Amino acid sequence: MDADAPGAERPDAPPVATISEALGRQTNNVAEYTGLLRALALAEELGAEEVALLLDSMLVVEQLRGRWRVRDARLAVLHAEALARLGRFRRWSARHVPRSENRAADALANEALDRVAAGGPAVVVRRPGEGIRAEAATRLADAPADVGDARPGAPPARARRAAVRDQIPLGLEPGFDPGDAGPEAGELRVRILGSGTSQGLPRIACDCATCTSADPRDRRLRASALLAWGARRVVVDSGPDFRAQALAADLDRLDAVLLTHSHHDAVGGLDDLRRFNEIADAYLPVHGLPGVLGVVVARFAYAFVPGQDAFRGLPMLRPVAVEGPFEIAGRRFVPVPVIHGEGPVCGYRTGSFAYLPDVKRIEAPSLALLQDLDVLVLNAVRDEPHPAHQTVAEALAVVDALRPRRTYLVHLDHELRHAPLAARLPAGVDIATDGLELRVPR
Ligand SMILES: [Zn+2]
Ligand SMILES: [Zn+2]
């Protein structure tokens, strides 16, 4: 799009130039980067001095901004080339747009697939003055939908692609319907394994009123939650208190671990997961945003060695990148990106339950993922402003905006003593305590 044209900042603005290219079999991320490189080359050719990228891949946006690390070797090459090309412009920016707003780009991808299926060229580049819109419309209308499909009565190619695409995680765009939890799901049971801040309560060698409180509710292990449905057991975060928490909960199986982020209070207990390798005689999947897994795999490299056939006393963890909604044993999980200090962080929603233990701010697209909740578990660290966490007031503002049926505050620091805080919370908002068990209807 020509940035001087009115409305050019909108992803659906009329383009002055397009590229449509079939890449053969590639991963989504290679395709995203390839598209980016082609577009930058064309922008340069057309004499652009500044570029504003509207990208529907959160991964590419965050990696270009340097906030997510690039772990994959193939992507690292493409990423480096993209930064080199961007450096030739006077100014550049990259913004994430939801895929639903990027239909024009999607149409170009479909056009390329249909064209190649019909024996046409792999690449079509249209430059300014070449009548793009009319030509694109004609091509889309004329494209034979069923070329290459010999089976009588088979659904058209476009419908088959859409069906496959619907099964592929769609990225972290907003407005995604969490949908039904699935047949095996039923009621969700949640146990708060830990409700404290990163140091836990009491703090070591602190004689403040909370740390010396006789109220057992003022003892808080590091934040973690156990989710159970049917026989399934999943923990969100596995911090340095994981062993004590697993023993307290009598945890005797574990199907997966979900990580919210890579801070030590969320991942410091990964080594103790090896007990569940012994029990199940299998690798344990560890789900997290790509940037979180990058840090964790680097820190616990010995626990992520693939292809081991015998245990050597080491954890055997299998990293599973979270790039959109995913399923574990029939239950659907939706990552909810949030702001919390540096680096990528998310919470998770499943059914009508959401768990957000490490949050400074929730932006509008993520708020949209948190509508109609029965139970929200949300952090509130203290009353004074904190660089990485919500205050009590900030948490209550989120509750006001979302109106979940029940809310439990977690990740409390020692400025917050249970009893006086509980006395000033509004109806429907409680404080989570270690060992608290919740039932969520769906
Ligand atoms: Zn204290
Ligand atoms: Zn943290």
Image (cartoon, rainbow, N blue to C red):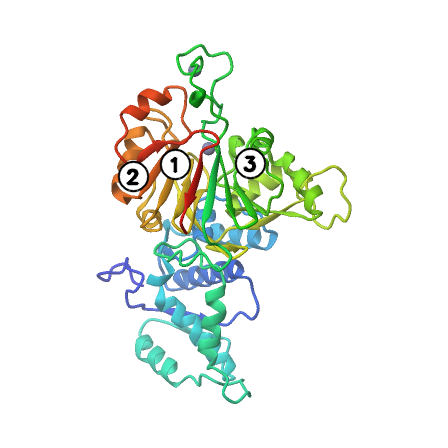
Look at label 1 and name its amino acid. Answer: Val
Can you give x and y, in whole percent of width and height, for residue 155 in the image? 47, 82
Residue topped by disc 3: 238
Mark 1 or 2: in front is: 2
Look at label 2 and name its amino acid. Answer: Val
**What kind of element bears circle 3?**
loop
Nearer to us in this view, 432 or 186: 186
Q: Are marks 1 and 2 in contact (CB under 8 Å)?
A: yes
Nearer to us in this view, 426 or 386: 426
Q: Which mark is residue 398?
A: 2
State the CA–CA distance, disc 1 to disc 2: 11 Å
State the CA–CA distance, disc 2 to disc 3: 26 Å
Nearer to us in this view, 303 or 83: 303
> Does 321 sit left or right of 217 as displayed?
right
> Does 267 sit left or right of 8 as displayed?
right
Residue shown at the point (61%, 41%) measured from the top left: 297
Q: Does the closest atom of ligand 2 sit within 8 Å of the Cβ of label 1?
A: no
Look at label 3 and name its amino acid. Answer: Ser
User: Where, by quadrant of the figure, is residue 392 drawn?
Assistant: top left
Can you give x and y, in whole percent of width and height, for residue 296 in the image? 58, 39
> Does 426 sit left or right of 104 as displayed?
left
**What kind of element bears circle 1?**
loop
Residue shown at the point (59%, 51%) measured from the top left: 72
Of marks 3 and 1, which one's residue comes earlier in the chain? 3
Of marks 2 and 3, which one's residue comes earlier in the chain? 3
**What kind of element bears circle 2?**
helix
Residue shown at the point (48%, 79%) measured from the top left: 157
Nearer to us in this view, 33 or 371: 371
How dense is the environment of label 1, judged by Cα within 10 Å: few (below 14), some, or many (20 and up)?
A: many
Residue topped by disc 1: 359
Q: Quadrant of the N terminus?
A: bottom left
How dense is the environment of label 2, judged by Cα within 10 Å: few (below 14), some, or many (20 and up)?
A: some
